Every structure is written in C-alpha cells, then in structure tokens.
Amino acid sequence: MKSIRHFKTIILTFMLVGLIAFIAACGGSNETGQSGGSGSIDTITFADAGWDSIRIHNTIARNIIENGFEYNTESMPGSETGSLIGIGNGSLDVYMEIWTGNFYDQYSEAIESGDIVELSVNFDDTAEGLYVPTYVIEGDAERGIEPLAPGLKSIHDLPDYWEVFQDPEDASKGRIYGSIPGWAADNVLEAKMVNYGLEDTFNYFQPGSDTALNTSLINAYENGEPWVGYYWEPTWIAGMYDITLLEDEPYDETLWNDGYLTEFPSQRLTIAVQNQLPEQAPDVAEFLSNYATSAAITNELLAYMQENDAENEEVAEFFLKEYEDVWTTWVSEEVVEKVKAGL
C-alpha cells in the first residue's frame, strides 16, 4: 500500500511539474510571446465600458498601436465599474476614458496601491446630470412650441412640473429617464431620487442601453415633446440638439460623499493601464502618456459618426487625417510614417 501511494505521489509530482512548465510557456493572458513591438506582451486588451466616445478613442489608439508599434490589440466589452476592476487585476490592459469622478475613492485607492497606473488625462471639460430640451423652458417660435416649464431652472424645481413630464405608464407621476444600469451615474441618480424627494412625484426609468436612452430623447425632441433625463457631454446628442443641463447645488466634496447632494463634479477623463503594461510595452505606455484630446474634438468625432453613419474605424481614420497636427505630437516620426502607411 505504501509503495502504491509513493508511486501516485511521483506521478502527481510529474503532472504538477508539467503543468507549471505549460503555464510558464503560455505566459498567462498578458505575457505571451510577442508578435510585434518592443515589449513582452502579445495582445493589448482595451476596456469597452459601453459608450461611443470610449470606443472611438479605443479605435484611434488601437490603430496607432497596431500600425505604429506592431502589437496585436483587442477590445473587451463590460460595465464601467467592471472595466476598472479589470485593469486593476490585469485582465484588461488599457482604459482610455475613465470618468474618475464617478468612483473617486475606488480610483484613487487603485492608483495609490499601485494596482493601476494613470498615464494621461484624455480630456477634462465634461458635464453630466439631468437635461431637458431647451424648448421645454424657453419654447421654440420657429417650431410653434410654447414654453412648457418656463420656471424650470434647477433639479429642485422638477416636482413643480411633474405633470409636464407625465409617465406614459403611470399618470400619477412624471418620468425621469435615468442612467444605464451598471454605470456609476445610475447609483448617483437613484440616491438623488430619494435624497431630493423626487421619488414622491417621479418614477425613475432605466433605459436598457445608451441606444434606448438616445432614442427616447430624439423621439421626444423631434416631436417637440417634454423629456427630462440623464445625459452627459461630450456626445453627438449635445452637439446636434439644443438641450439644457438643469442646475444643482454647486459641487462640494463633503456633500457629494454624503448622498450626492450636489451637481456632478467636473470630470477628469483619464487614461490608465494595468500596472505591468509600462514594463511589458514601454513604447505603448509612452505613447498613451502623450495622448490628449478635448471635449470639442470628441464632440466633432461623435457628430461625424452620427451624420455619416460611420463605424468606429471610419471615425478613427477621419481623426488621423483631419487632426494630424494633434496625434503626430504623441509619437515619433517613424511611428507617424507607419501609421500613415496603414491608412
């Protein structure tokens, strides 16, 4: 019996050694034999947290990395919070548009602990909150629309006008179109519904996607109907339609942390990576540390996408051709030539 157990132990030992050798050869999900670039990573995985602007920036960066640095890239869909967790645990490599104010504490802790590395600020001139079409407040003489809520200025004024925004499924309350489930803004708005007393006069309606949210706003706008709901800038919607952000209390960190009792903070949209990437792909990390755009540029890219029914790849090519003076400052002349050759 002892000899049988000993034999089994020897077999298991060899199996374990073989397994370790196999894992070492494969290198895990990030550290495989490279097909290009100067680092030790084969495929660089980008976080797709679910909205158009991050997909555009992902595609721009992926184009430059694939053509200019010769790495493979891919994009992984997920939620906003899940994407942050992904770069923290190394299952994702690059997060191109982190709305840092949506989870300030978690983001700061991840930076301080070294789980993720912030490389750049993509842009920081943003806005978000509850919006209405401007004609709801001011009317639109050209369209023959009278002001529907002329005294509406603040989110706190909404209870006075709930009947203007009547819920089509519940005539006793108005409807506020909320954020997408899984987005950090969803938690903020749900708290505001309670803490601002909005739940007494409004139902909080969660669209299932950004497409559903867009559709509800566009349909209302084109028909000249009232609408109130969550939106943000930059977006093509904000660029193409006249909408107004309802006022809230001026941002105060203490009040924000005590039930989100203020306006959304102005956001730093950063670019961060998993902590091994600067060693695995130092050339890519250097490029990303130089990457910087603006809300104005992003609005134009989003508007181009909408007006031309363009795919992300087409928008990226539009950017690379029209904003050559911007992106060529991010990389070397050698990389510039490679990217141009790949267009």
Image (cartoon, grey):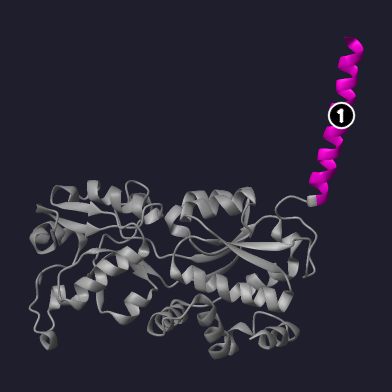
* Residue in the foreground of this view, choosing between 255 and 13: 13
Image height check: is 233 above or below 116?
below
Report the predominant secondary structure element of the magenta stretch.
Answer: helix
Q: Is residue 9 magenta?
A: yes
* 208 horizontally vs 163: left or right: right
Magenta residue span: 1-25
Can residue 302 be spotted in the picture? yes
Q: Is residue 206 magenta?
A: no
Q: How many marks?
A: 1
* 29 horizontally vs 82: left or right: right
Which quadrant is home to the C terminus? Answer: bottom right
- Residue 93 at x, y percent in the picture: 63, 59
Locate residue 147: give its quadrant.
bottom left
Determine the residue located farthest toward the top in the rendered image: 1
Query: Residue at 18% across / 48% down in the picture?
Result: 199
* Residue in the foreground of this view, choosing between 328 and 267: 328
Residue linked to disc 1: 13
Query: Residue at 15% across / 69% down in the picture?
Result: 226
- Residue 61 at x, y percent in the picture: 60, 73
* 65 horizontally vs 264: left or right: right
- Residue 312 at x, y percent in the picture: 51, 76
* 191 horizontally vs 19: left or right: left
- Residue 231 at x, y percent in the picture: 32, 66
Q: Label 1: state its secondary structure.
A: helix
Which quadrant is home to the N terminus? Answer: top right
Can residue 111 be spotted in the picture? no
Query: Residue at 67% across / 88% down in the picture?
Result: 340
Locate residue 228: give its quadrant.
bottom left
Image height check: is 300 above or below 49?
below
Q: Amino acid at mark 1?
A: Thr
* Residue in the foreground of this view, choosing between 50 and 88: 50
